[in-house]
Amino acid sequence: NAGVTQTPKFQVLKTGQSMTLQCAQDMNHEYMSWYRQDPGMGLRLIHYSVGAGITDQGEVPNGYNVSRSTTEDFPLRLLSAAPSQTSVYFCASTRYREGAEAFFGQGTRLTVV
Amino acid sequence: AQKVTQAQTEISVVEKEDVTLDCVYETRDTTYYLFWYKQPPSGELVFLIRRNSFDEQNEISGRYSWNFQKSTSSFNFTITASQVVDSAVYFCALSVYGGATNKLIFGTGTLLAVQP
């Protein structure tokens, strides 16, 4: 049982480049989300989705784009990478149930130079 | 607004010592959930426990125990007889009820170093 799978694990981008972080889950969870983890700041919500075709912004959405065409996949797009987007990114999935725990992917360490 | 505060940035203990990680939360909602997650050096996030706002019973799981006190808005985590494998960053998180958004608000984490 793979759970939540993120690719790639590591990535270095040049300022201005775009890229997509992939996230897939095989637990048939309705709710998926992206967080970024920065030193001293914990995890902050970027975007989330409550189901296919439905997405919404979290706390720090600027510079990121998401879509949800299937239940399984929730890619995160960096439109024009900036050094401030250097971070560790986590994708999570949750059952659509009050108080359900989130299952996280292994994370993607992104460096923008 | 909701907020989670983990005032302890780093804690260092020697193996077999007991250690308590503090978590203080803020919310005006009456229905909410509190979580603890562990992030070992390998980087993944591991769910440890969930507590809802109507259940103030303390929980014990092996060497781990959790003390939830609504009166002080705290959800503290104690590790008894710590081991080197407990070395990790521990996050406390809050989820409030409202449209089933399941959004988690995380604290800044506490880095626990257990020395042999």
Image (cartoon, coloured by chain):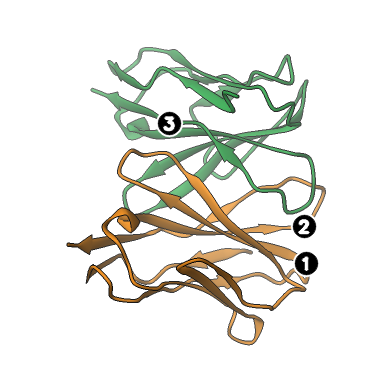
Q: Against B40, is A87 above or below?
A: above
> Which residue is the extreme one toward the front?
B62
Residue appearing at x 32%, y 67% in the figure:
B82
Neighbours of disc 2 within 10 Å: few (<14), some (14-19), many (20+): some
Disc 1 residue type (three-letter): Thr
Q: Nearer the viewer, residue B114 or A69?
A: B114
Q: Which residue is tagged 3?
A: A107
Q: In the rendered image, what is the letter of the chain coloured green?
A: A
Helix, strand or loop under label 1: loop
Marks 2 and 1, the one that precedes in the sequence: 1
For the residues labelled 2 and 1, say whether their Cβ atoms are less than 8 Å apart. Answer: yes
- Chain B shade: orange
Residue A98 percent coordinates (x, y): 78, 51
Disc 2 residue type (three-letter): Tyr
Residue appearing at x 38%, y 71% in the figure:
B7
Disc 3 residue type (three-letter): Gly
Q: Which residue is tagged 2?
A: B97
Q: Nearer the viewer, residue A34 or B86?
A: B86
Q: Which residue is tagged 1?
A: B31
